[in-house]
Image (spheres, helix red, strand yellow):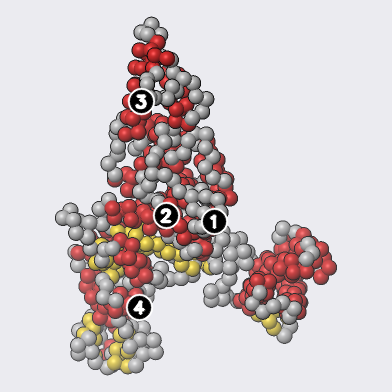
Amino acid sequence: MLGRRGPQRGLFEADTAYGAFVGRDSFYGWLASQRGELFRDEEFAGLYALDNGRPSVPPSLLATALVLQTYDGVSDEEAKQRADYDLRWKVALGVELDARPFAKSTLQEFRAQLIVHAEQAAIFRKSLELAKRRGRFRAKSGERRKLTVALDTTNILGRGATKDTYNLLADGIVKVARVLARLAGVPLAAWAEQHGYGRYVTAPSFKGAVTIDWSDARQRRQVLGELVADADRLLELVRQARASLEAGSPDETMLVEAAGLLSRVLVQDVERRADGPELRRGVADDRLVSVHDPEQRHGRKSKSKRFDGHKAAVAVDTDAQLITAVGVLPGNAQDHERALELVEQTEAATGCAVEASIGDCAYGDGETRQAFHDAGRTLVAKVPAPPDRGYFPKAAFRIDLETLSCTCPGGQTTQTLLKGKTTTGRFHFPTAVCQACPLRAQCVAGRNGRTVDLHPQEALLQAARALQASPAFAAHRRRRQVVEHRIARLVQLGIRQARYVGRAKTEFQLLMAAAVANLTLLAALSDRPNSAASPALGLLALLIGLLALLISRALGPSQPPDAADVVRLIRTSARGRQRHPLPTALSMPGCRPDF
């Protein structure tokens, strides 16, 4: 059942008693001040049964704990320890000093429920809703701003182990063997020994346990042949076991998934020949790199920078510097994939129209420009420069789309447009004209005349090159730097390395980092409360003063009350523990004697 926190704060909660000590201008103190506004228990009601069971730990408290966990970059176990013993966490959570607010499994279950119910973005959305209430998406006049968002990506290293083909096949064999052993009801080691797969489960690394000269190609190929033969035999056992399983049952699904991974590794990495299997040359498209995290991919951020994992796509409001949308792409995806989707998510999350989107040259291809143009949106991105081949680039030619003509740097014009294989067409300059041109050595190689491709989005690319050459483009380039700063902040919050296996959980990690990046920015921009002006602290001081006055009058001026006695009386009255009556002089008609 959904557990709820009452709207009233207690006098002995850590944020009341120690908020000033921790610092109300710290992120922990700021989170404490947002209790009841940032997260509300009823907003997470869809994760709980509402009519049965014991009351849960309030989800608003657990959501705050997830924010603190991301902010401090700690594990689940450390998060539980800090909630129990760290004064800063107790202030932020708003619990009493002796409280142990949740178990580690409770925090893990709450995170799992968010992912299972497709609510990974719930906490991130709350950060944007708070920004809207703070007016961060409104102009000074009060109306909603038209946003300019900057787009970019960065790599996330996958959690699953990436191995070469030999160990990848061995891991695939173990994965299938584990499922078959479970279906047979016997331990994995016993099942493997019985079926001749013992060497795959006894050593931590199959390749490390094989005693051959790995520099010898013949011996390497022999080991590969043994691996492939064992894999084929194991897949035959899968077919036999599957025949006895109910179609669509969880056991069959689990077996098919494991066998599918092994089969995929065989197809992508092994070439079967008449004289035996051999490693396939080159890298297969969309190659599976880890059986432990099948969604990881080989990725590349530049010619020299490679990685295995995923890509984080980020959209940032260049004025408020708030992250407005994020997504996780496969590691081998192009940077511009889902760019339009991020813009649409920004509008849905902020309630503001996006006036322009700014990206680097990875977003400047013709297809992406066409998609934005068809959606009625403005995209500002540098046109990718062609490779330098030592001759005049295409940009040196003037293409007139109205007359369908092309003019070269030498002043020659052609309207001969040949049909292209991958382009709309190709302008061709006559061979005789090019041979007589004094610029021929700088323009074309070979005997034939120069050709210039006509791109399917030539008009959009021409407009982009014109903007790129104008002074206005420098302002766009400066505004785009905001997304790089926000990505640097996300990296500080730990997104460079995935903490979990799978793209869905990795996206949750990215969303939590984005939420914390937004919340810390909002905390820095908010008006900090005076540490001595807390209403709860003022009330506490007033109560202590009144009680001190009453006790001093009862005991006489020669016996001033001790501060510990005053605090003990407050705790006794508030909690109803060990009640001791005050002196008779304080008793009043119609009142409880221990009040």
Q: Is residue 170 visible?
A: no
Q: Where, by quadrant of the figure, is residue 487 drawn?
A: bottom left
Direction from residue 174 to residue 560 in the image, left or right: left
Q: Are marks 2 and 4 in contact (CB under 8 Å)?
A: no
In the foreground, 107 or 1: 1
Report the mark closest to the observer, 1 or 3: 1
The residue under the point 33% across, 88% down is: 424
Q: Are marks 3 and 2 in contact (CB under 8 Å)?
A: no
Q: What's under tag 2, amino acid-wise?
A: Glu
Q: Position of residue 227 (x, y in %)?
A: 73, 72
Q: Earlier in the sequence, mark 4 or mark 3?
A: 4
Q: CA distance from mark 1 to mark 3?
A: 40 Å
Q: Earlier in the sequence, mark 1 or mark 4?
A: 1
Left or right of 491, for residue 400: left
Q: Is residue 48 above or below residue 215?
A: above
Vertical placement of residue 9 versus 58, above or below: above
Q: Nearer the viewer, residue 96 or 10?
A: 10
Question: Distance of mark 1 from mark 4, alpha carbons?
Answer: 53 Å
The residue type indicated by label 3 comes to Leu
| Residue position marked by numbered label 4 in the rendering | 367
Looking at the rendered image, the disc whose residue lies closer to the viewer, 1 or 4, is 1
The local secondary structure at tag 3 comes to: helix
Left or right of 242, for residue 1 = left
Residue beneath disc 3:
543
Query: Would you call the spot at circle 2 few (<14 residues within 10 Å), some (14-19), or many (20 or more)?
Result: few
Q: Which mark is residue 42?
A: 2
Q: Nearer the viewer, mark 2 or mark 1?
A: 1
